[in-house]
Image (cartoon, helix red, strand yellow):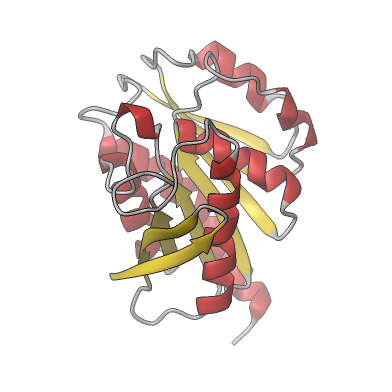
Amino acid sequence: MDRVRLASSAGELEGLLEIPAGFTGLAGVVLCHPHPLYGGTMRHKVLARLSSTFAGLGAAVIRFNFRGVEQSEGSHDHGRGELDDAMAAMDYLAGTVSPRHLILGGFSFGAWVAARVAVTRREAAFCLSVGTPARMYDYRFLESLHLPTLFVQGDRDDFGSPAEIFALSQLDPLFQLATVPGADHFFTGRLPALQEAVAGFFLPVLDQLGRLSGP
């Protein structure tokens, strides 16, 4: 795993880039971390597990610190400038490893940012929303997100009940919901189940894309 610096509208951001052995260029993943004002960083346990899961599937993964977090320049912008930060990570990944298919995802606040960016940046092929904070933010924009999207939610999540996330997942036939029994917002003690849900969705998708790409 390499430490990298990304250029954004706030200045330089710090990131971590993981390129698995034998990477074929098939898929790249951008992961956005939870809320910076509540201790969220790219090293959060949920993001670390997601990164490990995708690398295990053969994808290159970049996670990064939003503006104002740890060594990233700038200051927190309440979800506005953070959109630019996610786009900067997308551009960096494209320029570094040129994945043929891009997955844009995040956890909690980062899930909200990632989905909003996916609406406007059409090069994203898939979206991942973990711990969707449906009670914190307006999610009407999902009506414009026409991408295969996986929502993974704990059934004890205080920021979005299974019923609320199910309602969001019904906005488009391309959306799918995986509920993790017994998991709170941070998937305490349920991180392996989170990984299983993510791998269960993306493994067959990437296998199919690999077959379509040919040798």
Task: Give percent across and percent down for residue 21.
Answer: 33, 79
Task: Give percent across and percent down for residue 145.
Answer: 74, 39
Side (left or right) of 67 relative to 99: left
At horizontal 33% and vertical 36% (from top left) the residue drawn is 40
> 113 above or below 135?
below
Task: Give percent across and percent down for residue 64.
Answer: 40, 54
> 33 above or below 206?
above
Side (left or right) of 87 relative to 187: right
At horizontal 52% and vertical 65% (from top left) the residue drawn is 28
> Which residue is more in the foreground, 77 or 208?
77
> 99 above or below 214?
above
> 187 above or below 121?
above
Task: Give percent across and percent down for residue 191.
Answer: 27, 37
Which quadrant does the N terminus fall into?
A: bottom left
At horizontal 44% and vertical 31% (from top left) the residue drawn is 108
The single residue placed furthest to the left in the displayed view is: 189
